[in-house]
Image (cartoon, grey):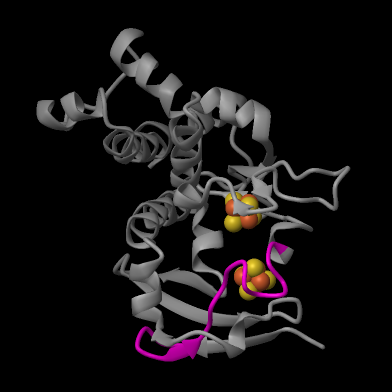
Amino acid sequence: MESDFISLSLNDSFQFSCGSHTPCFNECCRDLNQFLTPYDVLRLKNNMGISGNDFLQRYTTQHTGPESGLPIIRLREKHEDAFKCPFVTEKGCSVYHDRPSSCRAYPIARAVARNRQTGKLTEHFMLLKEPHCKGFHTGKHQCVKEWIENQGLMIYNEINDLMMEIISLKNKTIPGPLDLKSRHLFHMACYDIDSFRDKIFNKGLLVPTEYDECLLENAKEDDTALLRISLKWVQKMIFDQFK
Ligand code: SF4
Ligand code: SF4
């Protein structure tokens, strides 16, 4: 049986439920090809109480995006055990509260298109019906909008969309892969937020003057506030200089 991809709007509804009651429980957490966004990494490393650098070393591999030429992060699956996610257990996902955005969204996939003239983002949604997933014939009907809210996806989508601006800026200013120094800075600012904090607050890494004192003060303790700063920092310090 082939997979089905069904286009949906925010108000279209679908029937779905997932949990230990489904015969396919945990089936979707193996044969993994899972990419992580900066906000996924932040939530996962905090869930485990480890630094960004520790998390990246232990659980991920780094690659270059074939289209964007930017560093991307992939969860390191267990090769010796059916390419399972490192966080799946017999009882389900051990990091459920902080699972990545693509795990939260499934079986909905969200794509975002950016208008080149206005910069406005437009969302598109698809329902993925894959043969291994048996969750489609039970559970309540809900619309895509409710699903996004119930799965706690608003904050993920908001921060993931900031990456769209970076990719667009990168495509405009630097075709092809980044040089080594920019690659290192990009990787640190997007994925290794604890090192970024140390660099800007203790090592004097240049911070653009337009950040107000209150935002910077919050970012000393609050990782999400710091990530908002670091993504703007990437735009300004890595890509704006080439405009
Ligand atoms: S993070 Fe959790 S939900 Fe996502 S693939 Fe791993 S075990 Fe499954
Ligand atoms: S395969 Fe589908 S229904 Fe089964 S556990 Fe995964 S998401 Fe849930």
Does the rendering let one see residue 181?
A: no
Quick check: 181 left or right of 10? right
Residues 130 and 184: in front is 130
Magenta-tinted stretch: 8-26
Quick check: 119 left or right of 8? left
User: What residue occupies the far top of the structure in this picture?
Assistant: 203
Q: What residue lies at 26% left-to-right and 37% top-to-bottom?
A: 225
Quick check: 96 left or right of 11? right
User: Residue 228 lies in magenta, yes or no?
Assistant: no
Residues 158 and 222: in front is 222
Q: Position of residue 94 (x, y in %)?
A: 58, 46
Q: What residue lies at 42% left-to-right and 54% top-to-bottom?
A: 160
Q: Position of residue 110 (x, y in %)?
A: 49, 71
Q: What residue lies at 35% left-to-right and 37% top-to-bottom?
A: 227
Q: Position of residue 153 (x, y in %)?
A: 39, 62
Question: From the image, which quarter does the N terminus lie in?
Answer: bottom right
Q: What residue lies at 76% left-to-right and 51% top-to-bottom?
A: 84
> Relative to residue 106, is residue 232 depicted above or below?
above
User: What residue occupies the far right of the structure in this picture?
Assistant: 80
